[in-house]
Image: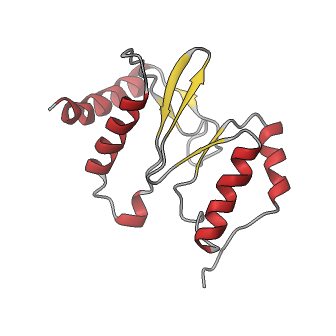
């Protein structure tokens, strides 16, 4: 019933692995286009090819060059924009999975291009880095209460 519904052959995971994709956020408006079974199949095929999956209520912790990185994915539009408490709760859950207490925050943009998402995250610098760090600090204050 959707205008655009997406699905692909399970062998397409090879495109992701060849492109260096190591993790995928499945919290999006198309992950359930073909129902719950299709969503579970997607998780199965991605993880069988070594791609970590996360999103919605599923979290993951990856070791990246000796650093534990917690991955969460929240789909705001599904449940409205009032997702702040869910984000806080999910961060707490992931923090409980990460064994060391070292926290390194690296502010990033989801895209290296402005105006559209090219799916190539970019580390932020200068005033934009400071703006994002301030936002993270504001949201993190609630975690310490």
Judging depth in this view, the residue of 58 and 118 nearest the camera is: 58
Q: How is the image coloured?
A: secondary structure
Query: Residue 127 appears in which quarter of the rendering?
Result: top left
The number of callouts visible is 0
Judging depth in this view, the residue of 80 and 110 nearest the camera is: 80
Q: Is residue 140 left or right of residue 95?
A: left
Q: Residue furthest bottom?
A: 1
The residue positioned 79% from the left and 49% from the top of the image is 13
Q: Residue 85 location in percent, x, y? A: 26, 49
The residue positioned 63% from the left and 69% from the top of the image is 37
Q: Is residue 105 left or right of residue 136?
A: right
Q: Is residue 86 left or right of residue 144?
A: right
Query: Residue 39 appears in which quarter of the rendering?
Result: bottom right
The residue positioned 69% from the left and 61% from the top of the image is 41
Judging depth in this view, the residue of 66 and 1 nearest the camera is: 66
The residue positioned 42% from the left and 21% from the top of the image is 99
Q: Residue 1 location in percent, x, y? A: 60, 85
Q: Residue 36 location in percent, x, y? A: 58, 69
Quarter of the picture containing the C terminus is top left
Q: Residue furthest left?
A: 145
Q: Residue 19 location in percent, x, y? A: 79, 37
- Residue 70's place in the image compared with 8, above or below, is above
């Amino acid at each position: 019933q959707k205008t655009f519904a997406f699905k692909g052959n399970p062998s397409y995971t090879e495109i992701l692995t060849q492109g260096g994709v190591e993790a995928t956020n499945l919290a999006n408006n198309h992950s359930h286009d073909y129902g719950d079974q299709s969503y579970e199949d997607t998780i199965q095929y991605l993880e069988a090819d070594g791609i970590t999956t996360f999103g919605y209520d599923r979290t993951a912790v990856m070791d990246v060059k000796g650093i534990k990185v917690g991955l969460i994915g929240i789909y705001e539009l599904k449940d409205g924009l009032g997702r702040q408490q869910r984000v806080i709760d999910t961060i707490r859950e992931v923090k409980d999975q990460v064994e060391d207490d070292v926290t390194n925050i690296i502010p990033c943009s989801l895209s290296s291009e402005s105006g559209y998402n090219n799916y190539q995250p970019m580390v932020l610098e200068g005033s934009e880095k400071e703006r994002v760090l301030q936002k993270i600090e504001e949201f993190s204050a609630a975690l310490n209460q």
